[in-house]
Image (spheres, rainbow, N blue to C red):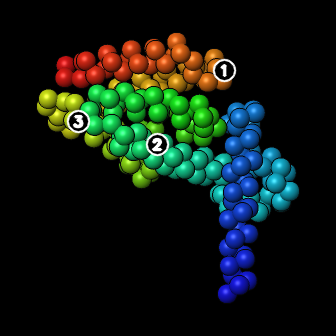
Amino acid sequence: MLVKNNRQKHKELTKKAILEVAQEIVLLEGWQAVSMRKIAEAIGYSLPVVYNHFENKDAIQEEFVKNGFNMLAMAMQTTLEQYTEPEQQLTQMALTYYEFAFSNAAYYKMMFGLGIPSCQKANEIAEIRNFGAIVIKVITSLMAQSDEHRKFLKFHTLWSILHGLTSINMVNHTAAPDEMQQQILLDAIQGFIKNINR
């Protein structure tokens, strides 16, 4: 039993090392620079060891997507619980999203390496669904009438605003959101809330 536990612990540590190295590569060189061979060299293991943990580069990205959306959903839930008014909740959740992106830049870049996940991808990955459900709950509470189509339309509109502003600032290599960028975000969110029933 002890050997099995040690083997499992070693496997978990190796997986963690692979993810940490991938994260470092993303921060320094971008996602396109990540390769299984580069990861193996960085952690000092053979290429087959890396493939034993992850089938390919896409599997590494999916792990980051799951972990990242789980972290984001937890941050959004924590923010949601701190406020009682839906307008405040949504505004603060937008700021939380923005701060998450810059505090976890490597995760964020891998979570959205190919843009906002499609509906199909969101349905396949529980962590994305959970994030969406938290935001949709607040959006629904602000809507006078909320059929499924309008809820999802408003959710994707909000997500596009958040992701768009975040991506613009990341492309400009801004280290962290400054006051002007946060004012732009707040202005966009206030406009979104004002027009949510249109």
Circle 1: element type: loop
Q: Which amino acid type is shown beneath numbered disc 1?
A: His
Check if mark 1's residue and mark 2's residue have beta carbons within 8 Å: no
What number is the disc on residue 140? 3
SS at circle 3: helix
Camera-side mark, 1 or 2? 2
Determine which residue is flagged by label 1: 173
Q: In the image as oriented, which residue stretches furthest toward the bottom?
A: 1
Q: Earlier in the sequence, mark 1 or mark 3?
A: 3
Distance between mark 1 and mark 3 Cα atoms: 34 Å
Judge whether 132 appears above or below 171 on screen.
below
Residue type at mark 2 is: Ala
Residue at x 68%, y 73% (from the top left corner): 8
Q: Is residue 92 left or right of residue 31?
A: left
- Quadrant where the image shows the C terminus: top left
Q: Is residue 113 visible?
A: no
Q: Quadrant of the N terminus?
A: bottom right
Give above or below for 137 relative to 63.
above
Percent x, y for residue 40?
Answer: 80, 53
Q: Earlier in the sequence, mark 1 or mark 2?
A: 2
In the displayed structure image, the side of residue 175 where residue 121 appears, left or right: left
Residue linked to disc 2: 75
Which residue: 49% across, 19% down? 182
Distance CA(mark 1)–CA(mark 2): 24 Å
Q: Please name the amino acid that badge 3 sits on.
A: Thr
Q: Residue 17, labelled with which disc?
A: none
